[in-house]
Amino acid sequence: MFTGIVQGTAEVVAIKELEQFRTHVLRMPAEMREGLKTGASVAHNGVCLTATAIDGECVSFDLMRETLRLTNLGAVTEGSRVNIERAARFGDEIGGHSMSGHVICMATLSEIEEAPNNRRLWFTLSPEIGRFVFEKGYIGVDGISLTVGEVGRNEQSDAVAFCVNLIPETLARTSLGDRQVGDNVNIEIDPQTQVIVETVERMLSSRGLDIAN
């Protein structure tokens, strides 16, 4: 389990490519490696990965086909930085919200609004996933626990748009401060919201009703 409170970023120093398989080698700061052992779970841009080898400050992680298909880690190159969070432990403060590290899809950064001391980012999602996104609800963006500011819909494409508001600490600590329009980010929706929405849809469907009405 993760909390969505990213501890910092780590540089990808090497990538080993095989057919539909990758190994990322990260240079992790000492404070992020404390107590780390092979087999431990570490979230990269919100994706739960397993540490497969530790060599000094360098830690290796394997990425399988499904991870490369669903997430932005397949587009990572040497020199890229990824958001890092170690798995939560009993007794840790839960400052964000409970996250599994199982990314459901990617969203595209469509607009950046600058304001004094903060930044608003707008993303677009498919309607299939967008139906789980609600104003003031939780969402995981590249592993960061964020509150949804507003939700809208593009009438031409039917895509769902939502925004998040970032404080200077989030911009400094994570990779979201470097994101540009057109970039893809990993999305993990709140599982409780997903269960509620799907349950209501099933109930309405069984009664011959459409939730869109």
Image: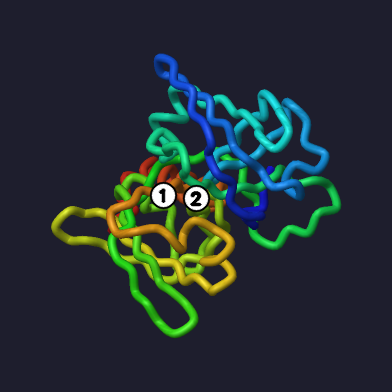
Query: In the shown orientation, is residue 184 left or right of residue 169?
Result: left
Q: Nearer the viewer, residue 106 or 126?
A: 106
Which quarter of the figure is the C terminus placed in? bottom left
Q: Name the spot of residue 205 as percent of width and height, x first.
A: 36, 43
Looking at the rendering, in which quadrant would you find the N terminus?
top right
Residue 185 marker: 1
Dot 1 alpha-carbon crowd within 10 angstroms: few under 14, some 14 to 19, many 20 or more: many
Q: Are marks 2 and 1 in contact (CB under 8 Å)?
A: yes
Q: Is residue 197 left or right of residue 7?
A: left
The alpha-carbon separation of the residues under discs 2 and 1 comes to: 6 Å
Looking at the image, the residue that sits furthest to the bottom is 116
Instruction: Name the residue: 14% across, 58% down.
Output: 156
Judging depth in this view, the residue of 179 and 43 nearest the camera is 179
**Residue 182 on image: x %, y %:** 28, 53
Q: Which mark is residue 142?
A: 2
Q: Secondary structure at mark 1?
A: strand
Locate residue 47 relative to residue 54 in the image: left or right: left
Q: Quadrant of residue 202?
A: top left
Q: Front-most of 211 and 175?
A: 175
Which three-letter amino acid code belongs to the residue tagged 1? Val
Q: Residue furthest right?
A: 91
Dot placed on the residue nearer the N-terminal end, 2 or 1: 2
